[in-house]
Amino acid sequence: MPRVLARRRRAADGAAAAPEDAAAAALDQLEEVEWVEWPDEPRHELLFELPEAPADRQADGGAKPPLAAARAYAAVFPAGGERLTLFHRHREDTAYVCVTGAAGDGGDPADAEVWNEELRELSPEAAAAAAAAAAAAGAGARAAPTHELLPPSRVHHASCQCFFNPHATRDGGRYVHRIRYAAGNRATLHFVGVEVRPPPSSAPTPSADGAAPLPCLPPPAPNLPLELEHEQPGLFRAWRLTLGGGSGGGGGGAGQQRRGLAPLGGGFARRGGAVVLIKAVDDWGKVAHESADDKGPFGAAARRRARGAGGWSAAAAAPSSSFPAGAAWPLTPQDGLEAFSLAAAGDCVLEAMLVEFL
């Protein structure tokens, strides 16, 4: 467990003090801070992990494209008391799906108290200045801080929101933080983070004029609502899928004929991806899924990956036809090549985020 000496940067008049502020380097503001990698942080639960694979390796003797390397985890903060994570590091660019937001008494996520505190390496210039200040104070070089603690910042997250944190491309794999969930919050905050590895060097890149690659998905079908929730050019797209509950995928009594079957597939997730359920599915028998041999992102093989992932996603005690909110499973490139259809019947609602690696 790495241990560093950090100075605490204090907010001034509601704003963070400048890094060069000599007062921020005062020796009486120094703290020893320990941090871990996120898999060792107790509130982060691994959902699935795919090993790295050479870009030119073909699975199944070359019959199918290789599965893209990816990793996903859940972070759950139940209501009823203060929840504080350890300081922990994220190395990879990550697409975050907020399964449930931490709404406060007013029902608005902005009412909830969720605080983020970042531990950041000092710049070489600031570290040298801190060392000089420590030496001048007679404390010796060992007392010089190498990091700083930024003032806690309040963050707001709504249910079903998808956002991106470039922990690799912006932070160089050195992002260390902790989350404090206040005791007064009355709702559970539940995230699923899907790490998005950069494409291999042989992967298609944007054209010379800077245009983004063409979409991998066809336009959303009228009876299969697909909405582009977030796009990070060159890395991933997140598509929100909603069926049932009056969204065009059924409704009415349980015996009502299923409506809303529409094709999806044929080029989706060419590098793989992930499915994250935003709402629980208590009875998968109410979801009409049609494809060759029950394949595709919601087919039997894909759902078995959720069962085999372990942890939150597996719901081992639940019947095989049910899945909790936050269940997640990896997509193979083959999943996206399979044409399939979906619909929901009765009171069933299927709401999911499809994360497509570009």
Image: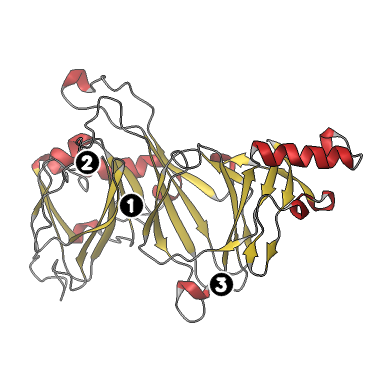
Residue 252 in the figure: left or right of residue 56: left
- Amino acid under disc 3: Asn
- Amino acid under disc 2: Ala
Residue 270 in the figure: left or right of residue 134: left
Residue 124 in the figure: left or right of residue 192: right
> Hey, which residue is sitting farthest bottom in the picture?
106
Q: Under tag 2, what secondary structure?
A: loop
Q: Give the residue pinned by disc 1.
A: 276
Q: Is residue 170 above or below residue 199?
A: below
Q: CA distance from mark 1 to mark 2?
A: 14 Å
Q: Specify whether residue 82 is in view.
A: no
Q: Quadrant of residue 169?
A: top left
Residue 269, disc: 2
Task: Give the crowd class for mark 2: few <14, some 14-19, many >=20 residues within 10 Å.
Answer: many
Q: Nearer the viewer, residue 195 or 352?
A: 195
Q: Earlier in the sequence, mark 1 or mark 2?
A: 2
Q: What x and y, as percent, mark residue 231? A: 29, 51
